[in-house]
Image (tube, grey):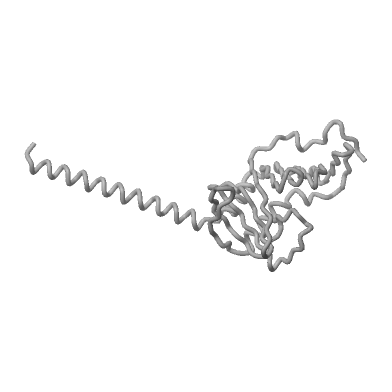
Amino acid sequence: MDKKKKIIIISVSVLIAIIIICVAIYFITRNVAEEANENKLAKMYNRMMENETYSINFKLDDNNQYTVSRKENVANIDTYSDGTHTADIIRDGNTMLLLYSTNRYYTYQNNELGLTQLSNMLDNIIQSQEPEKGEEEINGKKYRYEEYKGVSDFLMNTENTVSEEETNTRFYFDGDDLKYIRTIMGEESELVQVDTSYQVDDSIFEIPADFEEG
């Protein structure tokens, strides 16, 4: 192969490499821009509503947490409040309140507010405004967040005096997964850890065998 052909081959190879690099940079830049503009809370809400099957745990600490589980027309809201364990099972248009301290349950007829309470809350937040976006480090890891003004729906410590106008809520995401919620009240804030699943065990919608109706 003569010198001229070698130069042509090298030039073409370099040109192809440059084109590949430019295309890669374009798609990476576009994906980053799309992710920055994407409303992740709305994306999460849409996934929840797609099959109406989800289980989301909100944890302040071991003694204060609750899990909202839903599968179509049944739901379970399992709550630990200062260590006291209760649950609401919503099905057939009624709500059964379970008290684990006494292994008894009470039925509230024609009451299924808990079935859509979480999804309605998220929908109202999403529809109310466009969030401010940013990044923040929590426990040594950076998360993207979406902040909504005048929102206090996820505050778990109800002893705090809350003014809606001065309260903001940040939703922190790792990719598309919601990991934390911070309620900001002036100079104070409350951080709640979040764990989400889109698979639910049907047994949680049944009254435990050792419970008696009150």
Question: Where 191 sits versus 167, above or below?
Answer: above
> 51 or 193: nearer the eye?
193
Q: Position of residue 24 (x, y in %)?
A: 35, 48
- Between 87 and 160, the one lying in front of the other is 160
Residue with the most extreme bottom position:
165
- On the rendered image, what quadrant is the N terminus found in? top left
Query: In the image shown, does 176 or 134 lie closer to the viewer?
Result: 134
Residue shown at 52%/55% (left/top)? 38
User: Could you say where residue 79 lies in the image, as x and y percent from the top left?
Assistant: 78, 45
Left or right: 81, with 12 as reference point: right
Residue appearing at x 60%, y 50% in the figure: 44
Front-most of 82 and 89?
82
Q: Is residue 206 left or right of residue 168?
A: right
User: Residue at the location (71% across, 66% down)?
Assistant: 164
Which percent across, then down, holds residue 16?
Answer: 24, 46
The residue furthest top is 209
Q: How many marks?
A: 0
Task: Name the quadrant of the C terminus.
Answer: top right
Q: Residue at x 70, y 35 (%)?
A: 201
Occupied quadrant, residue 68: top right
Q: Is residue 82 left or right of residue 191?
A: right
Q: Residue furthest left?
A: 2
Asked where in the image residue 122 lies, by quadrant, the reply is: bottom right
Which percent across, then down, holds residue 105?
88, 40
